[in-house]
């Protein structure tokens, strides 16, 4: 019996890269944006008003009139060296203030979208 959800022949190649996810308080957003802008990642995504619970308790996603206390999450994908540079740049921040970062292996189809142009 054939499974129609399994592709029989794909023409898409997957390319291995690293993904970094960063969660910080809104007041640290400019620092993280500057660090990502200065890195060699081609771009990043920002999610505002992140809600969750961690070491410091529950964090409400939407705080009226106060974007600086809310949580912000960044996603970026790049080559190992670029992600390591970001990790190194964030380490001093996390030694002094709350926040987390996660680095994982990921795969992309459109590699050209994730490589910095010279």
Image: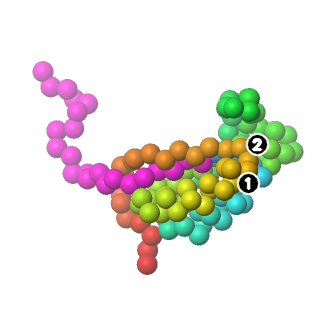
Seen in the picture, residue 70 relative to 3 is either above or below; the reply is below
Which mark identifies residue 105?
none
Residue range of the region highlighted in magenta in the rendering: 1-22
Q: Are marks 1 and 2 in contact (CB under 8 Å)?
A: no
Q: Residue furthest top?
A: 1
Left or right of residue 92: residue 85: left
Q: In the picture provided, is 75 more to the left or to the right than 71?
A: left
Compared to 13, does 1 lie above or below? Answer: above
Position of residue 48 measured from the top left corner of the image (x, y, whole percent): 68, 46
Question: Which residue extends farthest bottom?
Answer: 118
Q: Is residue 100 magenta?
A: no
Dominant SS of magenta comes to: loop
Q: Position of residue 43 (x, y in %)?
A: 53, 61
Return the x and y of residue 106 as percentages of the image width and height: 39, 47
Residue 4 highlighted magenta (yes or no): yes
Viewer-side residue, 45 vs 30: 30
Residue, x 68% and y 50% (percent of image)? 95
Q: Which residue is mark 1?
A: 28
Along the line of sight, the residue nearer the viewer: 83 or 11: 83
Q: Earlier in the sequence, mark 1 or mark 2?
A: 1
Observer able to see residue 48:
no
Q: Quadrant of residue 92?
A: bottom right
Residue at 53% across / 44% down in the picture?
Answer: 102
Q: How is the image coloured?
A: rainbow
Q: Quadrant of residue 17?
A: bottom left
Where residue 70 is drawn, which disc sits there?
A: 2
What residue is rendered at 42% in x and 52% in y? 18
């Amino acid at each position: 019996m054939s499974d129609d959800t399994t592709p029989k022949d794909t023409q898409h190649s997957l390319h291995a890269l690293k993904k970094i996810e960063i969660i910080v308080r809104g007041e640290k957003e400019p620092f993280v944006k500057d660090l990502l802008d200065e890195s060699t990642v081609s771009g990043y995504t920002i999610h505002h008003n992140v809600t969750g619970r961690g070491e410091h308790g529950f964090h409400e996603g939407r705080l009226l009139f106060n974007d600086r206390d809310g949580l912000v999450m960044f996603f970026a994908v790049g080559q190992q060296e670029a992600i390591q540079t970001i990790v190194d740049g964030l380490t001093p921040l996390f030694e002094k203030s709350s926040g987390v970062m996660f680095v994982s292996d990921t795969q992309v189809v459109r590699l050209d979208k994730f490589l910095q142009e010279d």
